[in-house]
Image: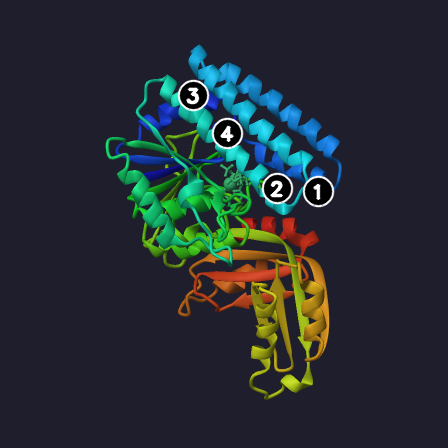
């Protein structure tokens, strides 16, 4: 069985949805189609919820009405049979009156999550009606019934495996399934989500749960490029990446993949292919166990919104247990550390989750002097940096020698070198690395 995930632009218009039917038809075998919301919808739903949380429910209602109008047009252009159009209009009335009702009452993050879930419910149901209209044998697998996270917000693979298995068993005669990306139930069975861009994560989790033959992530570009195409020109797609390399790039900012989306597929050794809906013939990128290449620098990615924390203490000198005490502060505030470098009397760390930054700094001050630099960017270079290679790390540093660097991390793994610098130097760093490495 294969899992095919289509992003927002791939379902972004009635024409695209029609084209999808054709595209799906070219992939052999039993398959689960995972859809994102129509491009722009989740952003609009966030906007609606934010306005409501801010107390401007009139504005929220206005944006909601505009969105409904866009969908009215969408369905009018998508279907040819009156029965399908009737079903679609009923769906729109149902979903949009639910949103309106939520906006009227007292509004909390719980209601916000229900609103955010409507984008994927709309796209999948509209596509389902379209396939039915075309005479396809197809079933919907409701993600809210099988996709679940625990108290820490981590997906529970065993639950997904069991519930999804049951749903598939109930449809033994069907070869084509549609499900929602992004949305899930939390540990209290309330509607939740896997964070922005989470449909990639859904696809990988589903692929892992059913031990799929392959997960295909269909988007608007021909695979993982060797640098950020939004910032650097002349980037090109990479044919093959290892799971580790792809995970590193996704985690450190390559927007084409949700930061956590490689791990489930990697754990169950399910290959992931990145493909282009707008150019289905392009080979794209294959992510698998075998993707490493000796002596090759593969790609560069960047992650913004980083804060660097520097702790200086002479008590650290020759002391053991010092780092443990520091790490415990981050553990207490459930804040992951991205980069770390140490010297005899100081340690620098970087984080991207700043909710508890003030509290963390306050607690760290008992160990020494603490400085914080905000608006930092991690630039991550992925490739073969094994212990017996030489010269590659030097090439990376040489490419950014004209820029002030805040931290350098090398040797943590043999497939990555990371540098931390002020975000104002990011674009120059990416371009310069591109020119000198590729
Ligand atoms: P989807 O809506 O299909 O999930 P996304 O917008 O989330 O699509 O991801 C695709 C986009 O990621 C591309 O259009 C591209 O601009 C951006 N992107 C950033 N870094 C990379 C990279 N290294 N390789 C390819 N695309 C990238
Ligand atoms: N629709 C969600 C978002 O915009 C999930 C996704 O597209 O992957 O974040
Ligand atoms: Mg995406």
Mark 3 or mark 1, which has the lower sequence index? 3
Ligand 2 contact, mark 2 (Cβ < 8 Å)? no
> Could you tell me how far apart the alpha carbons at marks 3 and 2 are, in whole angstroms?
31 Å
Comparing marks 4 and 2, which lies closer to the viewer?
2
Mark 3 or mark 2, which has the lower sequence index? 3
Residue under numbered circle 4 = 122
Query: Are the residues flagged by discs 2 and 1 in contact, CB closer than 8 Å?
Result: yes
Residue under numbered circle 2 = 112
Q: Is the image coloured rainbow, by chain, by secondary structure, or in one colour?
A: rainbow
Query: Are the residues flagged by discs 1 and 4 in contact, CB closer than 8 Å?
Result: no
Residue under numbered circle 3 = 18
Say whether residue 297 is visible. no
Q: Tell me residue 305's x, y (percent).
A: 65, 54
Q: Residues within 10 Å of mark 3 (few under 14, many from 20)?
A: some
Q: Tell me residue 47's x, y (percent).
A: 67, 37
Element type at mark 4: helix
Say whether residue 134 is visible. yes
> Could you tell me how far apart the alpha carbons at marks 4 and 2 are, in whole angstroms?
16 Å
Mark 2 or mark 1, which has the lower sequence index? 1
Residue under numbered circle 1 = 53
**Residue 382 tag number:** none
Element type at mark 1: helix
Element type at mark 2: helix
x 67%, y 62%: residue: 356
Element type at mark 3: helix
Comparing marks 3 and 2, which lies closer to the viewer?
2
Residue 19 falls in image quadrant: top left
Q: Tell me residue 411's x, y (percent).
A: 48, 69
> Could you tell me how far apart the alpha carbons at marks 1 and 4 are, in whole angstroms?
23 Å
Q: Look at the image and tell me in which quarter the N terminus lies.
A: top left
């Amino acid at each position: 069985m294969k899992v095919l995930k289509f992003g927002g632009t791939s379902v972004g218009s009635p024409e695209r949805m029609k084209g999808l039917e054709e595209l799906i038809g070219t992939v052999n075998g039993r398959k689960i189609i995972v859809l994102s919301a129509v491009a722009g919808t989740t952003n609009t739903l966030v906007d609606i919820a934010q306005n409501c949380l801010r107390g401007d429910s009139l504005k929220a209602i206005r944006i909601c009405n505009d969105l409904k109008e866009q969908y009215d047009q969408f369905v009018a252009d998508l279907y040819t049979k009156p029965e399908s159009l009737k079903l679609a209009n009923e769906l729109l009335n149902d979903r949009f009156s639910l949103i309106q009702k939520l906006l009227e009452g007292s509004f909390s993050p719980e209601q916000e999550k229900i609103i955010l879930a409507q984008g994927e419910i709309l796209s999948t149901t509209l596509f389902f009606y379209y396939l039915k209209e075309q005479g396809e044998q197809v079933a919907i697998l409701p993600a809210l019934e099988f996709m679940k996270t625990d108290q820490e917000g981590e997906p529970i693979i065993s639950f997904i495996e069991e519930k999804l298995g049951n749903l598939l068993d109930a449809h033994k005669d069907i070869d084509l399934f549609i499900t929602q990306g992004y949305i899930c139930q939390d540990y209290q069975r309330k509607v939740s989500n896997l964070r922005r861009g989470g449909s990639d994560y859904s696809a990988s989790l589903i692929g892992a749960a059913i031990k799929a033959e392959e997960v295909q992530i269909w988007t608007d570009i021909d695979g993982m490029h060797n640098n950020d195409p939004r910032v650097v020109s002349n980037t090109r797609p990479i044919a093959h990446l290892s799971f580790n390399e792809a995970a590193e790039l996704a985690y450190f900012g390559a927007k084409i993949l949700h930061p956590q989306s490689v791990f489930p597929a990697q754990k169950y050794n399910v290959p992931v292919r990145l493909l282009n809906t707008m150019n289905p013939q392009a080979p794209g990128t294959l992510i698998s166990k075998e993707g490493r290449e000796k002596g090759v620098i593969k790609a560069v990615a960047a992650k913004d919104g980083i804060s660097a924390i520097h702790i200086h203490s002479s008590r650290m000198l020759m002391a053991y247990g010092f780092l443990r005490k520091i790490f415990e502060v981050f553990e207490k505030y459930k804040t992951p550390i991205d980069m770390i470098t140490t010297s005899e009397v100081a340690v620098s760390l970087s984080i991207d989750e700043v909710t508890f930054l003030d509290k963390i700094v306050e607690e760290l001050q008992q160990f020494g002097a603490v400085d914080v630099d905000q608006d930092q960017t991690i630039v991550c270079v992925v490739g073969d940096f094994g212990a017996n290679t030489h010269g590659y790390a030097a090439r990376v540093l040489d490419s950014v020698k004209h820029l002030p660097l805040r931290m350098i991390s090398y040797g943590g793994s043999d497939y990555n070198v990371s540098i931390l610098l002020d975000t104002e130097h990011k674009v120059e760093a990416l371009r310069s690395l591109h020119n000198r490495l590729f």
